[in-house]
Image: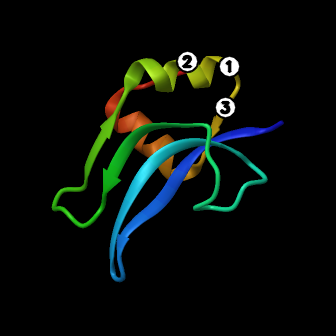
Amino acid sequence: MAVKIRLRRMGQKKAPFYRIVVADSRSPRDGRFIEEIGTYDPTKDPSEYHVNEELAKKWLANGAKPTDTVGRIFKEAGIEK
C-alpha cells in the first residue's frame, strides 16, 4: 500500500480550504483517508497553514511520500524527513 501525504479540498465554491491528510495513493482526492495532520488556507495573504509536526514526522519515517504542494508546506514549516 503506497501512502501519500496530500491535500483534501474543503470549503465553498471558489473559496478553497484544504486539510493535510495521510491517504492511500489509490483513494480519490476527497475520499477515504487514514489520518488528518494539518490544514492549509491559500485564500489568506500570506497563505496560512498548521501542521502537527509530530504526526508528520511519524508518517514520513514510516515511508509516506508528500505531494509537491505538501512538500513545499513542510519545507516552510521546517519539517524534514
**Measured along the vertical axis of the image, is residue 40 above or below residue 74?**
below
Outermost right residue: 1
Specify the quadrant of the image occupied by residue 30: bottom right
Q: Which residue in the structure is indicated by mark 2?
A: 58
Residue, x 18% and y 62% (percent of image)?
44
User: How far from the left and from the top, in percent, is residue 59?
Assistant: 59, 24
The amino acid type of the residue labelled 2 equals: Lys
Q: Which residue in the structure is indicated by mark 3?
A: 64
Query: Quarter of the image containing the C terminus?
Result: top right
Q: Which residue in the structure is indicated by mark 1?
A: 62
The amino acid type of the residue labelled 1 equals: Asn
Q: Which circle's residue, 2 or 3, is located before the other in the chain?
A: 2
User: How far from the left and from the top, in percent, is residue 61?
Assistant: 63, 17
> Is disc 3 in contact with disc 1, using a CB cutoff of under 8 Å?
yes
Which label number is shown at residue 16? none
The amino acid type of the residue labelled 3 equals: Ala
